[in-house]
Image (cartoon, coloured by chain):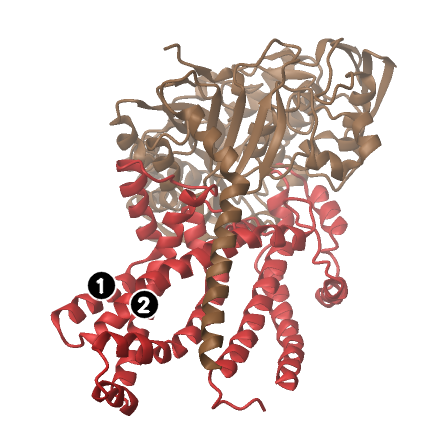
Amino acid sequence: MKKRQWTGLWITLLAVVMVLSACGGKSTSTNDSSATEGTGSGSASTILTVAAATDIESFDPHNNNNTSSEAVLVNVFDYLIKNDSEQKKVAGLATSWDQVDDTTWRFKLREGVTFHNGDPFTSADVKYTLERVAKDETLKQNSYFKNIVEVKAVDDYTVDIITDGPDPLLLNRLSKMGAGILPAKYIADKGFDAFLKQPVGTGPYKFSKWTKDDRVELVKNENYFDGEPKWNEVVFRVIPEASTRVSELLAGGVDVASSIPSTDIARIEGEADKKIVKAPIQRVLQLIFRQTEGSITADPKVREAIDLAIDKQGIVDSIAGGAGIVTRTSVTPGNFGADPSLYKTSLYDQEKAKQLLQEAGYAEGEAEMTISVSAQYKEQAEVVAAMLEQAGFKINLDVLEASAFSERYSSKSFKEIFMIGIGNSLFDASNNYNRYMLEEAKGESDYNNPEVEKLLQSALVNMDPASREKEYQQVQQIFSEERPAVYLYQMEGVYGTNAKVNFAPRSDEMFYADEITPVAQ
Amino acid sequence: MGKYVLKSLLQIIPVLFIVSLIVFILVRVTGDPVALMLPETATAEDRAVLTQALGLDQPLYTQYVKFLGSAIQGDFGQSFRYNQPALELVLERLPASFELAVAAMFFAVLMAVPLGVISAVKRNTFTDLIISGISVIGKAMPNFWMGIMLILLFSVMLGVLPVSGRGGLSHLILPAFTLGVGLAAQMTRLIRSSMLEILNQDYIRTARSKGLGRMVVIVKHAFRNGLIPVVTIMSLQFTSLIGGTLITETVFSWPGLGQLLVVAVNTHDMAIVQAAVFVIAFIVVIINILTDVAYRLLDPRIKYD
């Protein structure tokens, strides 16, 4: 009796093991072999494999808010207007555009474009897409598009986009995530859930397969309007652990790996067939001050002392592995309204910082303040704190886990200083400065300067680019004196690639597969 | 027996209820998902709209009653990040985690059984010492570190196994081995002491004195009985494997439940955290019951009251 039960148990266990391993092997063996084939040496490379740290959120371009999602989705969905690699606006699904009046823009659409399922692309798709993201308040991209009141289909290949007021940023909005054109008819026929399972766009690559937290597989769209795409297949792999991502690159499992830690740069550069490539990205690390009455940081002398006490280039060199560009403005080149005179420069003078602190009436160790920072910038914050202490400040470092930081951020409950890396997906200075407008600054920085307020309010609706640019440059000059924030450096994206591909990273961190080219052998 | 199973099954209900309450409160007091969902430039008004749309503006108890009501019907809410039912996402990942857990268990048994038996039979010899040493190291070595070292050796330097991801059997070897080593270390020591105890029993001496060969006695008499406690430990370990593969899954980017949970915690995807913890708790409870049942079946001396 006992013996039989024992044998039964063992056989069952063995059977379970065998069935499971057989299942695992069978279901994925096909993509396994194709992935290695593409990156293996010898035969012509027709598969591009890119590794990123985070997965896409979904194939809904309207309900996504992370750069790594857009980086993949741009290959499937086209925008009306594209940003080229220098962030200049070029024709996408729209061939030309004109401003009819202050609140109306007219777009001519490209003819003869089809979606991946064969449906023709027309003005109905533009109307459906933009009105969906403009009207559904629960979509994560809604805040960028809600000022669009209506999209009128004038004829099949002409649309008028009407905004609730003058909007100098409309073209910027139409060339970013949330403006990816969706197939109206396909979604009407099949429903949105079916669309998410089998997404269809007009882009150079078609959806093939998405295994969450593992890989997104795309295949070439033979009928792409802009010529045949370069790769037969593009695979985006998700590898959250940085050391695994580096190993995958070294072992030849991926062609491009993003977010290489500074400690691994030398190791990759040491390999004969591997390269490190860098590019500045749209993110500036900065300290934002509370200027509320009674706060130490309300004193301009204290803020200046903080600025002077920090050796920004030192932080770039020691913590960021050289991957950063010092700046005195957050509106970096490539963004509308940039003031180049404040870029690639920084102030550093410990002695003067000490002197300023004394002038402000604080003896050594008396100027006590808290710097809150999200764990991802912990090391930078530690160095900043050490430099400030050297100049005579007393710093309490408050390192918060990402979601705790986000909550404090949105509830505006930081103390004197918070440290944050702020991006700019609209490539426009308004994105950097809206937080300093009276209404938004309330409770956060409590910054209040009527002159700046006037300039910012005007620039928000100014449809004349030349004078609008001047307004933002003026704001930057004022900010460099008043220091509502101290800018540490513009971050750089660090990528590792193998020698078989040419890859010049973009400042918007997109992976346009066709901008990554195989090296001729 | 039937009565015992029924009673155990009924006990699941309060356990799951308490788990759901704790998880619900924890995910709600640790951060605001709305802040993570919106861009940095979103206004206070944007946040208010989204908070309301997600029902997060209501009092905690109202939210909990609503959550419990739908959870009973198998609806754990929508994942904020993926905009998909949370339970569906969790169940999608179970096979990957299960596959890894079974393979790890397979490695563990493969290593632990011979090592444990040998070290018991050769107790207090040099061999025993070596095996004990290895199992201490195996237990002490952190999973993530061993994973990274194995990747460097077998994938980067030797190039014989894939680095990461889920694919064929070859993708399974490194993560399963990494997970299996810690387990094996524990099991080796357990098998050793269990075998030692049995080797000293009267019936073993009787068998030997009847003139049976040493190997026959060890394999046919001692080994089988020595494994009884090991089976219990195995099933208990299996439950911890299902929920506890977080780090190993992350190191090998294995798309299982552990990785889903790590990302969900980082992005504050409350629905997924709730559903995942709930499912893990459910599996743990069920396996515990099955273990009890199996143990009682194996050892007739245990009563079913």
Mark 1 → mark 2, Cα distance in angstroms:
14 Å
Q: Which residue is mark 2?
A: B113
Mark carried by residue B134: 1
Q: Secondary structure at mark 1?
A: helix
Q: Is residue B99 left or right of residue A440?
A: left
Identify whether B158 is placed above or below B201. Answer: above
- Residue in the image at 49% along x and 70% along y: A8
Q: Is residue A433 left or right of residue A307?
A: right
Quadrant in the rendering for residue A498: top left
> Given the image, what chain letter belongs to the residue carrying mark 1?
B
Answer yes or no: is residue A6 visible.
yes
Pick the front one: B96 or B203: B203
- Residue in the image at 26% along x and 37% along y: B157
Residue A118: % across, % down: 75, 19
| Farthest residue, direction front | B211
- Residue in the image at 35% along x and 47% along y: A382
Residue B114: % across, % down: 28, 66
Q: Quadrant of the C terminus of chain A?
A: top left
Badge 1 amino acid: Ile
Mark carried by residue B241: none
Total marks in image: 2
> Given the image, what chain letter belongs to the residue carrying mark 2?
B
**Colour seen for chain B:** red
Pick the front one: A443 or B75: B75
Pick the front one: B293 or A465: B293
Residue B78: % across, % down: 70, 51
Q: Is residue A260 left or right of residue A122?
A: left
Same chain check for tags 1 and 2 = yes
Q: Secondary structure at mark 2?
A: helix
Indicate which disc, 1 or 2, sits on the residue closer to the N terminus.
Answer: 2
Residue B226: % across, % down: 34, 79
The residue carrying pointer 2 sits among few (fewer than 14), some (14 to 19) or many (20 or more) residues within 10 Å by Cα, namely: many
